[in-house]
Image (tube, helix red, strand yellow):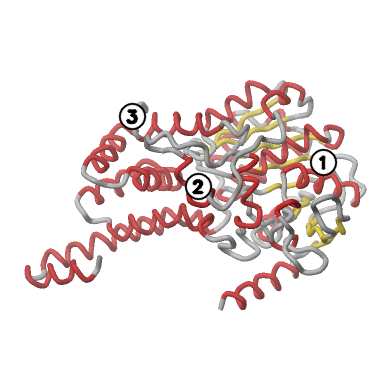
């Protein structure tokens, strides 16, 4: 079944419109391989290089619909399959690329190689999450190629976890934001009652980011009364699904082959501090398969004041993976930047593509200076959410809560002896 699924995904990926390959020569530590990428939309105008998150997220298959939408908006896009995954996973002999061929610097070189092969002198670079670090690294290494840059859900450095910890704890544990104080009290009471702290933190983070305060309060309230058992299990599995398997979804999410970037270059698993909402605990188990953190390849913070091209930052107000304070720090470092704040969680590229395309269209049209006007913010606020299937997560969680509540109500009406038996057999 797995092989059939992988083959079907490969067939669909290789049939993607605009698919091209570029033979990357063998260099020390990296064998010869074919780098896959797409070029779609109108050929005139400044192209937009779109770099998804990860590391591990493919470009070709997951973003077919995004590229079709971009083309309808008259946007010329290039998307490069990250070396080591998807259609860029293997060398010319069919063997997976070795660990020595996987690094941020080599991935940045791939972007430059594609632009050179396509005879593109400069491009707008759009990065999402991990892709923002690639985008910034490309700007540092090849500033002459950058016509503009859009950073969606900013990753600044290997030290970002300090800001993530502080922001998440302030909102959902300490309750410093008045509108979330009740959720923070409920969460603390669950942990005091015996719920696993790390698990509870993951559930609260995921539910709040995707569904907001109201849905989070529903989950925590039902959990406190024992009526969210299956919902809780479902949400706890979400955070581990992408990194728990080397190739969680072939040609879509393949963390394992490139996971070393996360740990050795970006420090995704720093030393845990034992407190709630510690991003280190989410990656601790996966990190055991890879070498320890060594150093990051670029000084993005130190380089940003020299970024002399138009910049736009997209931040999600509910983003708890790359939270607003990181974006705000980046904005303070940049000499020419517009900030677009969305009522959203992480990565507009994945969860709010029409907003992302609006920003791209403005930048590609060379009128990015208007991006933070009230008019543009109103237009973006009225756009429906379109993107990957994760946008349906709030509806799935809401349905699961209703199911849990219904099952609990039925159990209460059963005779005591049958309730006990039913409880035992369903744990």
| Disc 2 secondary structure class | helix
Q: Label 1: how many residues lie within 10 Å, few (<14), some (14-19) or many (20+)?
A: many
Quadrant location of the N terminus in the rendered image? bottom right
Point out the frontmost of discs 3 and 1. Answer: 3
> Relative to the observer, which residue lies in front, 190 or 366?
190
Give the number of the disc on residue 34.
none
Percent x, y for residue 352?
57, 48
Name the spot of residue 358 as percent of width and height, x first.
66, 43
- The answer to whether mark 3 and mark 1 are in CB contact below 8 A is no
Instruction: Give the residue pinned by disc 1.
Output: 123
- The residue where tag 3 is placed is 174
Q: Who's the residue at 58% across and 64% down the image? A: 249
Q: Label 2 to label 3, Cα distance in Å?
A: 24 Å
Dividing the picture into quadrants, the one containing residue 403 is bottom left
From the image, state whether disc 2 or disc 3 is nearer to you: 2
* Separation of residues labelled 3 and 1 (CA atoms): 43 Å
Kind of element beneath mark 3: loop
Residue at image location 40% in from the left, 46% down from the top: 202
Which one is nearer the viewer's eye here, 228 or 394?
Answer: 228
**Residue named by callout 2:** 283
N-term-proximal mark, 2 vs 1? 1
Left/right placement of residue 294 relative to residue 341 reads: right
């Amino acid at each position: 079944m797995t092989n059939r699924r992988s083959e079907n995904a490969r067939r669909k990926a290789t049939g993607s419109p605009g698919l091209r390959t570029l033979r990357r020569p063998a260099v020390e530590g990296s064998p010869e391989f074919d780098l896959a990428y797409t070029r779609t939309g109108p050929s005139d105008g400044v192209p937009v290089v779109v770099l998804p998150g990860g590391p591990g997220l493919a470009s070709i298959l997951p973003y077919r619909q995004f590229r079709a939408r971009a083309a309808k908006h008259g946007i010329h896009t290039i998307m490069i399959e990250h070396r080591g995954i998807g259609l860029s996973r293997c060398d010319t002999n069919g063997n997976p690329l070795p660990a020595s061929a996987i690094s941020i610097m080599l991935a940045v070189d791939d972007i430059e190689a594609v632009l050179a092969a396509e005879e593109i002198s400069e491009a707008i670079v759009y990065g999402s999450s991990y892709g923002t670090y690639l985008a910034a690294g490309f700007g540092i290494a090849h500033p002459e190629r950058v016509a503009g840059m859009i950073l969606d859900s900013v990753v600044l450095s290997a030290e970002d976890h300090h800001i993530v910890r502080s922001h998440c704890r302030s909102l959902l544990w300490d309750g410093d934001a008045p509108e979330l104080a009740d959720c923070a009290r409920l969460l603390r009471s669950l942990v005091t009652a015996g719920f696993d702290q790390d698990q509870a933190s993951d559930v609260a983070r995921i539910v709040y980011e995707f569904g907001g305060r109201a849905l989070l309060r529903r989950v925590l309230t039902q959990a406190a009364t024992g009526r969210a058992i299956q919902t809780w299990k479902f949400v706890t599995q979400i955070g581990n699904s992408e990194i728990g398997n080397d190739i969680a979804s072939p040609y879509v999410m393949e963390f394992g082959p490139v996971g070393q970037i996360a740990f050795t270059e970006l420090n995704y698993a720093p030393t845990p501090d034992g407190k709630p909402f510690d991003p280190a605990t989410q990656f601790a188990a996966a990190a055991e398969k890879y070498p320890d953190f060594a150093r990051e390849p670029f000084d993005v913070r130190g380089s940003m004041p020299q970024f002399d091209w138009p910049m736009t930052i997209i931040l999600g107000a509910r983003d708890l993976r790359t939270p607003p304070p990181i974006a705000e720090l980046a904005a303070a470092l940049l000499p020419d930047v517009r900030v677009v704040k969305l009522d959203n969680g992480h990565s507009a590229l994945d969860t709010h593509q029409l907003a992302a395309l609006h920003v791209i269209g403005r930048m590609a049209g060379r009128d990015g200076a208007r991006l933070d006007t009230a008019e543009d913010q109103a237009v973006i606020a009225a756009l429906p959410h379109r993107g990957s299937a994760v946008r349906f997560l709030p509806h799935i969680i809401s349905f699961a809560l209703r199911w849990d509540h219904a099952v609990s109500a039925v159990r209460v009406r059963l005779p005591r002896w049958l309730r006990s038996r039913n409880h035992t057999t369903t744990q």
